[in-house]
Amino acid sequence: MDKLIIEGGVKLSGEVTVSGAKNAALPILAATLLTDDACIIKGVPDLRDTSTMQKILRSLGKTAEYDSGNCMISSAKGTNHFADYKLVSTMRASFCVLGPLLGKLKKAKVSLPGGCVIGARPVDLHLKGLRALSADITIEGGYVIAKADKLCGARIYLGGAFGSSVLATDNVMMAAVLASGRTVIECAACEPEVADLAEFLIKMGAKIKGHGTPAIEIEGVKHLHGASHTIIPDRIEAGTLMLAALITEGDVLIKNILFQHQGGLLDKLEEAGASITKVDSSMRLRCAKKLKPVNITTFPYPGFPTDMQAQIMSLMSVTPGISVITEKVYPDRFMHVSELNRMGAHIQKEGPYAIVEGVRELSGAPVMASDLRASACLVLAGLAATGKTSISRIYHLERGYENMEAKLEKLGARVWREKE
Ligand code: UD1
């Protein structure tokens, strides 16, 4: 296993380009199960998670070939309906093959994804939505077994205790496109990645309206065909790069950003006093003056993203003053707090709140990445810290950030890998 070493203290400067969005690519690759025709998905980031999804598609009978961001999916020997625990357990998003398998084959056997270090992650909303479409669903031996003679459109309220669910909306939408009649998903997730999936489904012949809003309307069709699609830029990678520029007091031009997807984050960065210049789809970030602390509460989109909570905590940990960070999507998503404190941060966790007292500087230390976004948070902390930080279990970073190490190196960071 590799660990990542960062010698902090370099002000990042130069240009960097954001890759395609992981959270759009994964359900869009799964959606290719809805047709036997070939599909070409462009801008797929080269990540551990996208390669896991391709393995799952192959295990379900597809051919998946990947070359420089382009993924060509076709049907080799007809789709089978069984998604094995060994693959699904390695990545929670694999559960989004359930909706398209049920939609296309009217049957699916998909392993339950299990828990996760960022907290309990139930699938009740996925199952509620698919049952509402007339699927018969049982759980046996850790597998969800779903069957339907015919899927029927329905009005489905998909809100849960923590608001809408991204992958539940994806799953239900992918089953409903081939159901008979009209489906309305209320309290649907509005995340841009859900809307991007809907755009791909529409290119395949689906009839969908209202995607990107809390009410998605779907008129079922009999058949979907192959399509080609380019994935939207990754707003979480873009946000992480913005914070890398700010935390190192650098001067960085970030290319390939869709600003309309960044409202929750940009509002907070502007409140903190960051100097941001937007030109077309690029953004220049300079740290002209000291930032101010800001309070942050995570919410489903268009609120401040939970997937940026750990990274903004790194920035606040070196911003003088007090900030309160409240996690409303995954109340237990604070594994990074103790690691930041090992680097000299002053953060106190109280239930779903983290009270961050900004310190003058962090000092490099050996730390451990617990999950994908926590690993990005520790990379940011390492870039800002004095001395050497070594981050073990860095494979988490590879799940969601394409070439992050090379991108940072190009901006001047002193970063390299060593064997654990
Ligand atoms: C997706 C993202 C993940 C992001 C998360 C929240 C992908 C591949 N992953 O995950 O990066 O952190 O959205 O923005 O897109 N919940 C239930 N019942 C359910 C499903 C979810 O109670 O059936 C709860 C969850 O525990 C959580 C909240 O709803 O508290 C939101 O989770 P959800 O949007 O479903 O997350 P994912 O789609 O798994």
Image (tube, grey):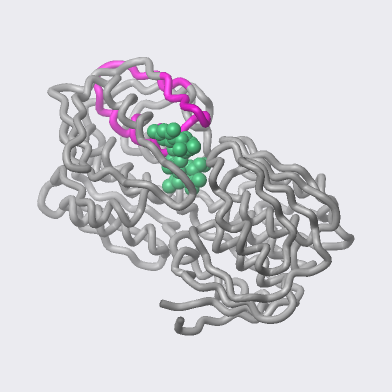
Q: Is residue 344 magenta?
A: no
Percent position of residue 142, x then y? 22, 43
Task: Return the x and y of residue 64 as percentages of the image width and height.
Answer: 25, 59
Q: Residue at x 37, y 45 (%)?
A: 27
Query: Can residue 263 be seen from the camera position used here?
Result: no
| Closer to us: 232 or 194 | 194
Magenta stretch holds residue 177: yes
Q: Is residue 64 left or right of residue 282?
A: left
Q: Residue 235 at x, y = what percent?
A: 58, 50
Q: Identify the residue at image location x=72%, y=67%.
A: 344
Furthest-bottom residue in view?
418
Q: Give 255 or 173, whichever is nearer the viewer.
A: 173
Q: Please indicate whether residue 41 sits to the left or right of residue 380 in the image.
A: left
Count of numbered marks = 0
The x, y position of residue 304, in whole percent, is 64, 41
Q: Quadrant of residue 125?
A: top left
Q: Which residues are magenta?
A: 157-186
Depth check: give the residue in front, 336 or 277.
Answer: 336
Tell whether 142 sits left or right of 234: left
Residue pushed farthest right?
289
Return the residue found at the far left: 77
